[in-house]
Image (tube, rainbow, N blue to C red):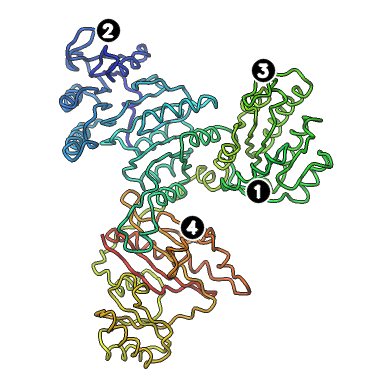
Amino acid sequence: MGRDLTSLFDPASVAVVGASDDPAKYGHAVASQALRAPGRRPVHLVNRRGGTVLGRTAATSLSAIGEPVELVVVSVPGAGFEAAVDEALACGAKAIVAITAGFAEAGPAGLARQRAVADRVRAAGAVLVGPNCLGIADNTTELYLASDRFAPGTVALLSQSGNLALELQLRGEPYGLGFSRFVSLGNQADVTLVDLVDDCARHRATSAIAVYAEDFGDGRAFAAAAAAAGKPVVLLTAGRGSASARSAQSHTGALTTSADVVSAACRDAGVELVRTPREMTVVLAALAAGPRTAGRRTAVFTDGGGHGAVAADAAEDAGLDVPELGARTQERLRSVLWEQSSVGNPVDLAGMGEQRPLSYADTVGELLAGEEVDAVLMTGYFGGYAASDGGLGGGADGGSVLAEGETRAAKEIVAHLAAVSKPLVVQSMYPRSASCRVLAEAGVPVFSATEDAARALAAMTGRAAAARGGAGAVPPLPPAAAPLRDPGYHAVRALLADAGVPFPAAREVTDEAGLLAAAAEFEGPYVLKALHLLHKSDAGGVALRLADRAALLAAYREMRARLGAPAHSVEAMADLTDGVELIVGVNRDPRFGPVAMVGLGGVLTETLRDVAFALAPVPAGRAEELLRGLRSAALLDGVRGRPALDVAAAAAVVERITAAAAAHPEIAELEVNPLLVRPDGALALDARAVLL
């Protein structure tokens, strides 16, 4: 059920320690906001000098109030912080909002102070937000303990930046977006982002959760909480482009960046990942609107060829599909449009709207009825007939016949939408016109920019929309297995083989006698590998297709003289005919735990960079999705007369590899490269591991 944060969001009483008449001090701003709803609960102002603050008598201490206070805001200089917290706990506080800074963000000594305070708070059965935060607000309980007002609404905003929160409020206003709650995360010494997502998921007045976070704390727990929320979670984060392991010792480590990890976690959890405050606003506006669907087949509808082409490109860039419409749908469209209209996709009125504005509604109705259409993106001039000034922002309503017809078309579009469960998003040159307002007031997202409309529609469709409708897809970590002590090649092979990963026959040898004995155990051709080299191929430590024992012995003598490796591996040469080499790796991220990578493998892995990521362990079904989503996925189905490969077998091996890695927290990087997938199965040809 998560932690009980009732005292934080709906306390019986509040005190602001550090309340001030000085507008330059944060205690002034918080106290001013706290007094906005004096009738809801007692609000006490505390200033060590006493006197009056904001026209009210201030207590010199919490103890001087003479009655318990359930929530205490602490906004005092750092030197007095611990004493203020201790007094709050002694006076019965169950929640503390710590504005004071100078803790973990200031270095090791500050972190130690922060941990000590958090321990005391938890021991007292209380909760603490911060320190180094900017306060909280809950419009549903009239709790105002931040420096700024937040318009009422249904979005819970959890942010590590006060300015970004203000920008989101300003950007959301034109779309009618408001906030149920605002929490400045601060250092998350006690109450974490995960705690807040859990609580907002249970909060009936919250319909969506918006997060700006630079520090996830336990990133995997965040993903799991978001997946289980049962309502949309939209994430804006920073620093996603830096490499998570610059000293990586495997292809997997070298290719895995923070951006890949966060993106994988968001995809698995059904979280909408955005890059800017503007994009976050667009997505929130879309999620607050009409129905959502798991399908991405999009009909682009325009009244001008240019807008249609641009919108089709924007839709595909956003991950939507823009297929040609079926014959039946095209036939129905021709019955309501004139001859020069295009009915393929994009669908173009080609000027008919100027002759008959209701053609907009007729076309939308037919598109929504199309079995091959999951969503509609309408783009172009619609709204312009009702905008008398002709400007991009729209103006006073026009009184022309066309304007009246356009407004009537908007109403009919709304009626069509009421009969189906498919999303419609509109881009208009005149988004504030009367006809566009009809659509917006009915819940249709309307945007001035084509890319915004496409991104909004993407948020209402596809896998993320499906995930938000039910249980999350964040895989649980398996129980920890007995630690791997030896990261050597054959020890790693043995670990994976025990997990069900198939390998060719192999023997480790240290001299010529052992080499010949190993060769006698299975038929050639042979493979010879020099061991204790991390990248054997790069160093010339792999010899393939050694036809017989004589060739094997010659290769051994040459390789040993050149590289001086203390041990070698003799292996049966796999049949590479009709096969494709894949890579499967797991890299342990400090925030999100084990993260899997699958892609096109072999010696060109880092050059081609055709890879995909997911939180590990990866179930076979999800693994197959990742493989079929690669740029080179066509190779798996057979090209130029080659047979289709056993992708299901490869996916099953991916599951076993990633599950084994996830069960070994001591493994920093584990990699199978290549994993050979053939028409008749999959075979691991090499493996390596790096311990923490």
Q: CA distance from mark 2 to mark 4?
A: 61 Å
First in sequence: mark 3 or mark 4? 3
Q: Which mark is residue 622?
A: 4
Placement of 670 over or under 440, stated as above or below: below
**Alpha-carbon neighbours of circle 4 within 10 Å: few (<14), some, or many (≥20)?**
some
Q: CA distance from mark 1 to mark 2?
A: 63 Å
Q: Quadrant of residue 351?
A: top right
Which residue is found at the position 33% from the left and 61% from the top? Answer: 669
Which residue is found at the position 42% from the left and 42% from the top? Answer: 226
Question: Which residue is labeled 2 in the image?
Answer: 56
Q: CA distance from mark 3 to mark 4?
A: 52 Å
Please state which of residues 539 and 36 is positioned toward the viewer in this rendering: 539
Give the percent coordinates (x, y) of residue 655. 43, 63
First in sequence: mark 2 or mark 4? 2
Quadrant in the picture for the C terminus: bottom left
Hey, what amino acid is under mark 2?
Arg
Hey, what amino acid is under mark 3?
Ala
Hey, what amino acid is under mark 1?
Val
Q: Secondary structure at mark 1?
A: loop
Please state which of residues 436 and 328 is positioned toward the viewer in this rendering: 436
Quadrant in the picture for the N terminus: top left
Q: Secondary structure at mark 3?
A: loop
Hey, what amino acid is under mark 4?
Arg
Question: Which residue is labeled 3 in the image?
Answer: 396
Q: Is residue 95 visible?
A: no
First in sequence: mark 1 or mark 2? 2
Q: Secondary structure at mark 4?
A: helix
Question: Which residue is labeled 1 in the image?
Answer: 322
Give the percent coordinates (x, y) of residue 217. 31, 43
